[in-house]
Image: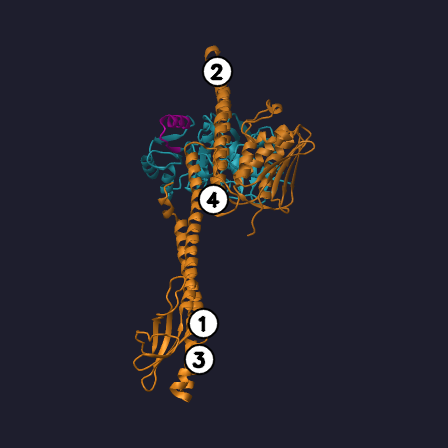
Amino acid sequence: MGGGVGGGMGGGMGDGTGEGQSREASGDRPFFGYDGAMKILVIEDDAQAAAYLVKGLKESGHVVDHVADGKDGLFMAGSENYDVLIVDRMLPGRDGLAIVEILRGAGTTTPVLFLSALGSVDDRVRGLRAGGDDYLTKPYAFSELLARVEALGRRKSAAEVTTTKLQVGELEMDLLARKVRRGAKQIDLLPREFRLLEYLMRHAGNVVTRTMLLENVWDYHFDPQTNVIDVHVARLRQKIDRDFPTPMIHTVRGAGYCLRA
Amino acid sequence: MPDLALFRTTTFRVALLYLGLFLASVLVILGLIYWFTAGFIERQTDETIAAEIAGLREQYRQRRLPGLIEVVNARSAVPRTSTLYLVATPTFTPLAGNLSDWPDDEPDAEGWIEFEIADAPEEPDGGSHEARAVVFTLPGGYHLLVGRDTMERRQFQDRVLISLAWALLLTVGLGAAGGVLISRNVMHRIDAINRTTRQIMSGALQERMAVENNGDELDQLAGNLNAMLDQIEHLMVGMRQVTDSVAHDLRTPLTRLRSRLEITLVEADTPDEYRSAIQEAISEADRLLGIFGALLSIAEAEAGTMQRSFQKVALSDLARQMADLYEPAAEEAGLSFVSDIRTEPEVLGNQQLIAQAIANLLDNALKYTPAGGCVTLTVSGQEGERGPCVSVSDTGPGIPAEQRESVLRRFVRLEASRSSPGNGLGLSLVDAVARLHGARLEMDDNHPGLIVSLVFPRMGKE
């Protein structure tokens, strides 16, 4: 009843990362808990929004370049090697969509996060079709943006690796046998719990927000009023952390969750 | 309306063309009638003359001139005969017959002659007696004339002609009048539509085209225009409602936010107080953004432009996913969650929006059903006239029948639920999504509780 949804739905699930434990906690963590610095290009014409964005990303430990118009953005994105591009959709002179289409046409595979005040279902589809990897509607919480940017950066670094096993600390997931164990203990999960944990493990060390979970584990893009996602995570946490002294699933206040060894 | 405009209308031109064709066919018919009546009588005259001649020729062969004269005299004596006879000497002096003079007119090659009878009695209509005859020259220079008075024939022909002419005149008159009348009638109605359109353009938005209920094209046009205007009015009213609601329901929390920040500025001393004030402000802003997002989603669904990107949606898969998403939350709230999905109907639509609508219904069910209750998600296929259907039922307080209409309006919340979180937009969005999909939103009593169903239109046969 209700649990028989097939796998392979989440956009971020099929990209296979095999290095679940490479980003373990390194003591003093920056702003939102990501410890691998990325090189990010922000293409945004609104000076105040851009300043806020650049400041936040820099404080989170990333290297950030900012350009205010599409032509410069195209030039920078083409000539430098960035981990993630953050592109505003409404730019003077050129639509952000067109920029990404040109970049994709030229063979650039750098992950792109669209920022847009246009938030309808159709706009979102258009953005992803133009070659965007994620789409965030303005206004957004910075924590949401950061989590998504870091998820995109991670994705690229592991894009080519296909794997059948995920490992974060003592937590192991066998994707073929659909089995999970923590240390010596076998953990039985419902299909949806398995998919949830898989997503968390693929983004281990990163903050994942509730909307990211809804989008990637359930493939829906709306905002449920009830705390449905929290309940799912709470149940998963019960199974993963209950009998162990150190918790692995952490709640990041005001942002979401983070799976850490 | 200037009368000249009549001649420019398509209807009038068509009427004129038909009148022309009608006239041509009437002319052909009248010509045939003339040929068969007047023409027949003319031919009959000639045949009678030929028969007379044959008889006289026989007499002449047997008894020569004296016999001929005798017969002619005898036949001329028949009272009121319209056959004319005349035998004359070589110098055209009449010898016998009922004509007093040999006519002066020259006969044609076949001996036919047409002339006026000089000594005929006056006719009451003043017309003269005309005759048609054949003349022969007998051996010895004597002349014979056999003919018929054609006055009656001509009178008949004239009468036929006159009646045909009247018929023609009447046809033209009636045809033209009919054409003008029809054209004027159509013009009048189009003019009425134009007039109403101009009135509406100049601001009288409640005006509607007059519909005569005879189901013709103009009626359909007027009906369609009225339906279009109704739709526009509905959208405008909706927009005005939104503007009013936004003014009220966004201004209230904004005011609250602003005054809270102001108070903080005056009263707060410690960083902790500032911090908690800012956190409150952020969550208030988030609530506002939530309202804003919901309003935009409703507007998007109501705009109806998404119908172009509709795809087949497997309703049961969607429902299973939503059940999967909501089941733990329901259990956490102390509710039992049942999903009753036994068929696999497909509908045409937008997966995200239908999912959001179901999610909103489940949100409501979870929010308003007290612990220990039951929430059921049901999918049923099409049965008879009823299309595929998704319904969410609960055992909560339900919605009184008289308030079911109003809860669909934006920002409307029932008194009883004012204290619980929510923005009063959930069901509005469900309603907008339903209308976008041509689906019906039904609310019924679940005894106890509420059952809300989205009844989709039946899928056409592939």
- Local secondary structure at mark 1: loop
Amino acid type at circle 2 is Ser
Inter-mark Cα distance, 1 to 4: 73 Å
Whole-percent x and y of residue B357? 56, 36
Dot 3 or dot 4, earlier in sequence: 3
Residue drawn at the location 50% of the way across and 47% of the way down: B216
Label 1 to label 3: alpha-carbon separation: 13 Å
Label at residue B285: none
C-beta proximity under 8 Å, tags 1 and 3: no
State the mark number for residue B80.
1
Question: On the picture, is B421 further left or further right than A49?
Answer: right
The residue carrying pointer 4 sits among few (fewer than 14), some (14 to 19) or many (20 or more) residues within 10 Å by Cα, namely some
- Marks 1 and 2, the one that precedes in the sequence: 1
Magenta-drawn segment:
A39-58
Marks 1/2 in contact by CB < 8 Å: the verdict is no
Give the drawing colour for chain B. Answer: orange
Q: Earlier in the sequence, mark 1 or mark 4?
A: 1
Q: Which residue is mark 2?
A: B259
Spatial separation of the CA atoms under disc 3 and disc 4: 83 Å
* B305 or A89: nearer the viewer: B305
* Numbered tag placed on residue B74 in the rendering: 3
Q: Is residue A251 visible?
A: yes
Q: Earlier in the sequence, mark 1 or mark 3?
A: 3
Asked if disc 2 and disc 4 are in contact, CB closer than 8 Å, the reply is: no
Front disc: 3 or 2: 3
Magenta stretch, main secondary structure, is helix
